[in-house]
Image: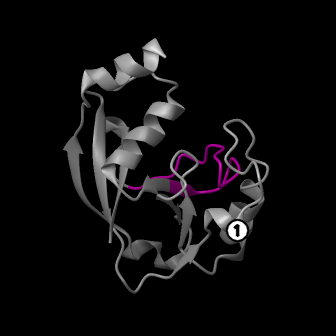
Amino acid sequence: MRVFRIAYKAYTQDLTPSKANGRWAAAGKAVVYAAGSVALAVLENLVRRKGEGFNDDYNIMVIDLPPSLKVQTITADQLPAGWNDILDYSKCQPLGNRWYDEGKYPVLKVPSAIVPREFNYVFNTNHPDFNKVKLVEVTGFIPDPRIEELLKSG
């Protein structure tokens, strides 16, 4: 399976975690986030950047997950109301932190807060099977400028 990540070019040579605070992992956890499609990766980035668009400083990272890799899945119907609140990670972080700390699965498949029928993927870079996750391609990325214009006008 292929998943996708959009990041600054300076951070696209490998799958190094930022250890920043996120919806599914508290600050300090060595995780990397990716999306199930390039389109979802674009949406996740635009929302996180609050409408500030991309420039030629960004790349798309194509990541391969082998079929043998164990993945824990959480679906939207398993989550409490408000799990997708844009500012409150308190309903998701404990689940992600538990997944990370237990160390049973190298990958956590979670619903996107933007499009709950789509999925994001969280990688535990400290898991022994993380070495099976491969960065297979890095390409430049500048989306259509109309996307940023729409976000800024709304």
User: Residue 46: horizontal and vertical position, in percent?
Assistant: 44, 32
Q: Is residue 13 visible?
A: no
Element class at badge 1: helix
User: Residue 83: horizontal and vertical position, in percent?
Assistant: 72, 51
Q: Is residue 154 visible?
A: yes
Q: At x 42% / y 55%, what residue is drawn? A: 35
Residue 43 position by quadrant:
top left
Question: Within 10 angstroms of label 1, few (less than 14), some, or many (20 or more) residues?
Answer: few
Taking the image as shown, residue 57 lies to the left or right of residue 52, namely left
Magenta segment's dominant SS is: loop
Q: At x 51% / y 52%, what residue is drawn? A: 17
Q: Quadrant of the N terminus?
A: bottom left
User: Residue 10: horizontal and vertical position, in percent?
Assistant: 34, 37
In the image, residue 28 lies in the stretch drawn in magenta: yes
Q: Which residues are magenta?
A: 15-32
Q: Is residue 28 above or below residue 150?
A: below
User: Residue 11: horizontal and vertical position, in percent?
Assistant: 38, 42
Taking the image as shown, residue 63 lies to the left or right of residue 22, namely left
Give the residue type at disc 1.
Gln
